[in-house]
Image (tube, rainbow, N blue to C red):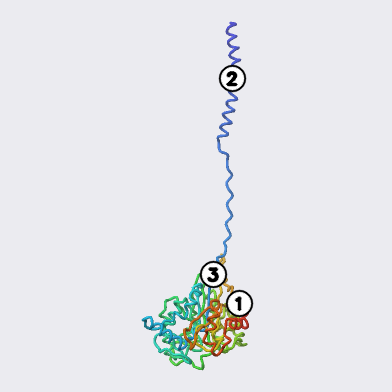
Amino acid sequence: MKKRLLVLALSVLALLMVVPLLGSAVDSVRDAASQAQPTATPAPSPSPTPEPTPTVSTVRFSATGDNLIHTGIYNQAARRAQAEGKEGYDFSFCYDAVRDFYAGFDVNWINQETLVNDELEPSSYPCFSTPGDMGRELYDTGFRVFSLANNHTYDKGAEGIAATRRFWSSLPEDAVTCGLYAGEEDYDNIVIRETGGIRIAYLSYTEFTNGIPTPSGAEANLIYTSQTDVMQRQIELARQQADFVVVGVHWGVEGSHKATDAQRALAQQMADWGAGVVIGTHPHVVQDAQWLTAADGRQVFVAYSLGNFLNAQSTADTMIGAVLSFTLEKTTRPDGSSETVLKDPTLHPTVNHYGRNYSQIRIYLFKDYTDELAQSHGVRENFPDFSRSYIESVLRNNIDNQFLDL
C-alpha cells in the first residue's frame, strides 16, 4: 500500500512539473504563429486626378515686301539658263544668299508685285509681266503665300488676270494666293490654311491700280481700300473662322518713309475689325512699325511698309527693305477655347544688290552684306554715299529700333 501511494505521489509531482512546460510551449507556438501571419497593410490613398493643362502650338512666320521684276532681272535669268544649256529662265542666283534664312520659318509670305505667268511675253514698267520660272523659284526658296493685290494687278487686262491665276493654280497645293476674287459672290470665301495646328486667314487689299479700272470680262477682281464695308465684312468673317488673321495692304506714297494719316487710320480700323497683323507694301522704301490696341484689347502689329525686295530700281533707298518675322502662339485650354497671339515681331533688313549697269542683281540680308559689296554697288554712280553705314542710318531713322535686327 505504501508503495502504491509513493508511485502516485511521484506521478502527481511529475505532472505538476510538466504542465508549466506545456503551457510555455503552447505560448511559444501561439507567439510564433502570430509572428508568422502578415501584418495588415493599409490600402493606399488614391492619387489625385491631375488638373488638365493647356496645350501650346507655335508657328514661325515671315513676310517680305515688293518682289518687283524689271527687264534686267529676267534678261539676266534668261542668259544664265542659256549658259547652263537650259530653256527658260534661271532666277536661283537672285535668291541664293537668303535661301537658308527662309528655311527657318513655317510660313513665308510675299507681295508678288508683278503678274507671273507662262503665257504672256515678259515685260517691265509700266505694265509688268514676269516669266513663270520666277514664281517657281520663289516656291523653291520657301515662299508659300503670295499676295497679289497691288497697283500692277490689272497691268495686262483680263488676259493677264486669267494667265496669272492659271499659273498660281499650277503650283503644288500648299502654295496659296490672296487678293483676287471671282466676283462679289466670292468675297466670303476666305483663304484659310492650317499650319502647325493654327488656322491662319489671308486677306489682301490695294489702294489703287494706277488708274486702270477692273478689266472688262475679267474672271477675277481685287478689293480697294476704299471699299471699307467689304473689308470689314471679310476681316470679321475671317476672325470668326480662323485663329489668326493676316492682312496685306498695298498703300501709301511711293518713295516716302512716312506713313500717311490715312494709313494709320485704316490700320487701326483693321485691328478693330479683327486683323492680327497688318503687312504694308507699295512705297518701295521702308516705313515704321508699331503695336496697336484693338477695340477688344488685343495687341495688333502693323508694319507700314516693308520696302522693296528684289528689284532693278535706281535710287539708294529703294535698295533697302525689311523682312518681318514673328511667332504665332496658340494656347488651347482644356475646355476647348483658345487664344492666338503674335510674339517677338522683328524686322530683318535686306539689301538689293547689283553691279555696274544693273549687272548680277541679287538680294542679301543686311547682316551678310559687306562694306566691299556696298562699295561695288551700281547705285553709287548716282548715290556715292551708299554704304553699310548709310543703310543703317536709313533704317534707324525710319523704323522703331526696338524691332530692328541689325
Using the numbered discs, state the Cα–Cα distance from disc 3 to disc 2 in whole angstroms. Answer: 88 Å
Residue at the spot 39% in from the left edge and 82% down from the top edge: 81
Q: Which mark is residue 403?
A: 1
- Classify 247 as above or below 357: above
Residue labelled with disc 2: 18
The answer to which of 321 and 352 lies nearer the viewer is 352
Callout 1 touching callout 2 (CB < 8 Å): no
Q: Residue furthest bottom?
A: 211
Q: Nearer the viewer, mark 3 or mark 2?
A: 3
**Quadrant in the rendering for residue 86:** bottom left
In terms of secondary structure, where does tag 2 sit?
A: helix
Q: Earlier in the sequence, mark 3 or mark 1?
A: 3
Q: Earlier in the sequence, mark 1 or mark 2?
A: 2
Residue 302 screen position, x and y as percent: 59, 80
Residue 365 screen position, x and y as percent: 53, 78
Q: Is residue 236 visible?
A: no
Residue at the spot 54% in from the left edge and 68% down from the top edge: 57
Q: Earlier in the sequence, mark 3 or mark 2?
A: 2
**Label 1 crowding class (10 Å Cα cut-off): few <14, some 14-19, many 20+?**
some
The answer to which of 148 and 404 lies nearer the viewer is 404
**Quadrant in the rendering for residue 122:** bottom left
- Residue type at mark 2: give it: Val
Residue 313 screen position, x and y as percent: 51, 88
Callout 3 touching callout 2 (CB < 8 Å): no
Using the numbered discs, state the Cα–Cα distance from disc 1 to disc 2 in whole angstroms. Answer: 102 Å
Using the numbered discs, state the Cα–Cα distance from disc 3 to disc 1 in whole angstroms. Answer: 20 Å
- Classify 376 as above or below 3: below
- Residue type at mark 3: give it: Thr
The quarter in which the C terminus is drawn is: bottom right
In terms of secondary structure, where does tag 1 sit?
A: helix
Residue labelled with disc 3: 58
